[in-house]
Amino acid sequence: MSPKNCTRRVDLVERFTIPQKILMRVGFYGFMIIGAYGIYLESILWGLIYSGFVIFGIEFGLSYFLCSHCPYPYKYSDCLFAPFWVFTKQYKFRPAPMSILDKTFFILAMTGFIVIPQYWLFRNYTILILFWIFCLPTIASLPFFWCKRCQHIHCCFNLVSEELISESEQK
């Protein structure tokens, strides 16, 4: 069997199903809520600080720096992370490639959502395990599934092949 025959065709996603949206949203917001709760159990002040970071990170790190470049809310009226109108009402579509500032703040926000709670979560293994039960499959699904099918071609994590991008632009 030749390697050519082993390659599997992957199509770009245009719309997300209800179960896909539910799984992504429960996993994504779930690990942040569990992280905030785990911190809150150890320190109310730091729990509130992390919650503020999450709100700020979602509003700017994701919504502005990443999602305002994404075609899904604007072109397909769809989104994995939130109802599409959350983005379309707040920000104009920015179809240009993400700037280094956009990429940096998006990556910092995503990293902070995961890394910041670890110090407090290691004091409560039950909450730590619960955090990773929500976090690991959600975050792992991005590069191993979603980023290979995503039409947000300017995202720093997009893994769609050049031939598939050019093929979709011709449609």
Image: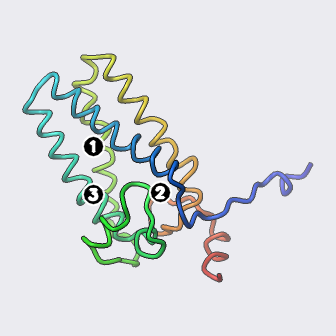
SS category of the residue bearing label 2:
loop
SS category of the residue bearing label 1:
helix
Q: Residue at x 22, y 30 (%)?
A: 37
Q: Pinpoint residue 123: horizontal percent, then vertical percent.
A: 24, 17
Q: For this view, does 149 lie left or right of residue 57? A: right
Q: Residue at x 19, y 28 (%)?
A: 39
Q: Are marks 1 and 3 in contact (CB under 8 Å)?
A: yes
Q: Pinpoint residue 107: horizontal percent, then vertical percent.
A: 34, 52
What amino acid is labelled 1 in the image?
A: Gly
The quadrant in which the C terminus is found is bottom right
Q: In the displayed structure, would residue 112 be above or below residue 128?
A: below
Which colour assignment does the render follow?
Answer: rainbow
Q: Pinpoint residue 139: horizontal percent, then vertical percent.
A: 45, 43
Whichever of labels 2 and 1 marks the residue nearer the N terminus, that label is 1
Rate crowding at label 1 as few (under 14), some (14 to 19) or many (20 or more) other CA atoms within 10 Å: some
**Residue extending furthest right?**
1
Q: For this view, does 51 lie left or right of residue 141? A: left
As drawn, the label of residue 112 is: 1
Q: Residue at x 51, y 60 (%)?
A: 158
Q: Quadrant of residue 98?
A: bottom left
Whichever of labels 3 and 2 marks the residue nearer the N terminus, that label is 3
**Alpha-carbon distance for marks 2 and 1?**
17 Å
Q: Quadrant of residue 131?
A: top left
SS category of the residue bearing label 3:
helix
What amino acid is labelled 2 in the image?
A: Phe
| Residue ID for mark 2 | 157
